Image: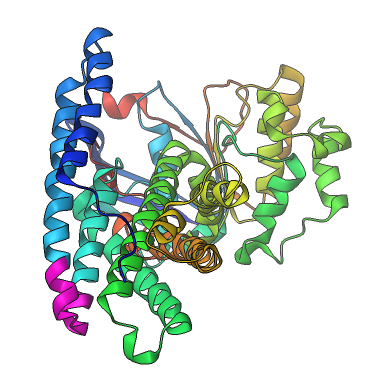
Amino acid sequence: MDQSVPISLWAMAAFYALLLIPAGLIWYFRLGMLRRMAVAVVRMTVQLTLVGVLLIYWFRWDNMWLNLLWVVAMVGFAASSAVQNSALRLRVFFVPIFLALLVSGLGVLLFFNVLILPVSDIFSAQYLIIIGGMLLGNALKGIVVGLSDFYQRLQDQQEAYRYYLAAGASRWEALIPFFRNSLQAALNPSVASMATMGVVFLPGMMTGQIIGGATPDTAIRYQLAIMIVIFVCIALSVVLGVAFSLGRSFDAYGNLRGEVFRSA
Amino acid sequence: MEVRLEHITVRFGQKTVFDDFSLHLATHTHLLVQGPSGSGKSTLLRLLLGFCVPDEGRIHIGGKPLNAQTVWSLRQSVAYVPQQLPRVEGTARQLLEQVHQFEANQRADFSEQTILSHFGRFGLQPGQLEQPVRELSGGEQQRLALTGALLLNRPLLLLDEATSAVDAERKAQMMDYISSLKDKTVIIVAHDPGWRAGQTLDLTSTHS
């Protein structure tokens, strides 16, 4: 089944040796990020190795509940990383973002699997975990952009929001202009990358499948399907993320709470 | 519409803006609120709009207590003119249309004829309806904001330095027109001399 040529340890060592080039550049031009680069490389190595070891077992056991547990854990990491990459406060936003990613990610993921797999395999590790990881990685970027934009814009233009409220708008009516902008900001990068896909770059999933032995026809179908579900997942997760967070971010009078932001 | 504030205390951190402050405004009274910057003039309006919740005390508008449940319907009895229109995208017409589209406002008269009659009264040109709000001068934006508030035709009108950027002649026209609104309760926060109101509140004294 595995048709890709394995990479020997010697070859891996040579790849790591290649890092001397950027390290040398960073040192020579005094970019001051040598340490950060080293830590990042070590983290990447350790994290991926651990995931690799875990995946070996998960693939061996291939139990539906364990696979779902993996997805839920991924959603948890994704949610906390999403909040930490924004100016928003973890205590307020973790639960709404977790739920938004879980509902949209898992919903879209199962839809994807139902369409391409026999029913008995929709919870199989190979698809649930791997496709789930791709989906969440991308939805994560979308939800960070969307939610940060929404609350930041609302904070910066609080007078506009209050003007609408004072004119008799319901909270939702007053928020629509802000929401529209943030959804647009979240979807824009995906729209742009869909428009250039295949022309400017060959996407990772497709590349991986072709190396793994799939025909270009199959690889392209998978890539198209995954791009569509990623796009849907971003749209859903931003809408749900905003909807689930509203209750915690405003007081009963409709005023944005100060503790929404970390540095507030 | 009657407005009553009873024993209001508002603190922002260390600063006490209102300390056991009370005010009663009978229906159809016009109140002019004066006082130096930081004396709480804008906070008074924010209290009435529910944008600032008092630490102590009660507020009644039109006989109803202002609280988290009633604030939404009470905001629909109020028309508010901020000192500056928010920096919104779109033309003057789009801003008015947006306000008109709120469910609470769909029955208000936002007809072309009514809009243009306010425009004429305050010296705005019909063509300015199609101009982006950001391109209007400060004084023009204030007149647009007043137009928007009057179109809502609410019983309580709150004006926050609503004529501060308008030239003297237009200012007099705006003040005269607002004075003529005998069927509305009006609260005017202003530094401008020249406003006429039945009742005056000087907030300097509450802080000295």
In front of the other: A188 or A3:
A3
Q: Position of residue B153 (x, y in %)?
A: 68, 55
Q: Is residue B127 left or right of residue A133?
A: right
Task: Identify the residue at image location x=34%, y=63%.
Answer: A3
Question: How many circles with numbers are drawn on the protein?
Answer: 0
Residue range in magenta is A56-69
In the rendered image, which quarter is residue A85 located in? top left
Task: Identify the residue at image location x=62%, y=51%.
Answer: B184
- Determine whether B87 is above or below A198 in the image: above
On whether residue A159 falls in the magenta region, the answer is: no
In front of the other: A255 or B23:
A255
Magenta highlight: main SS? helix
- Determine whether B144 is above or below A187 in the image: above
Q: Is residue B90 left or right of residue B156?
A: right
Q: Is residue A116 left or right of residue B176?
A: left
Q: Position of residue A163 (x, y in %)?
A: 54, 45
**Looking at the image, what colour scheme do you see?**
rainbow
Give the position of the C terminus of chain A as an image quadrant.
top left
Task: Identify the residue at image location x=67%, y=30%.
Answer: B134
In front of the other: A242 or B52:
A242
Q: Is residue B179 visible?
A: no
- Determine whether A76 is above or below B147 in the image: below
Q: Position of residue A218 (x, y in %)?
A: 51, 69
Q: Is residue B52 visible?
A: yes
Give the position of the N terminus of chain A as an image quadrant.
bottom left
Q: Position of residue B71 (x, y in %)?
A: 42, 61
Q: Is residue B177 left or right of residue B102?
A: right
In front of the other: A117 or B19:
A117
Task: Identify the residue at image location x=16%, y=40%.
Answer: A10
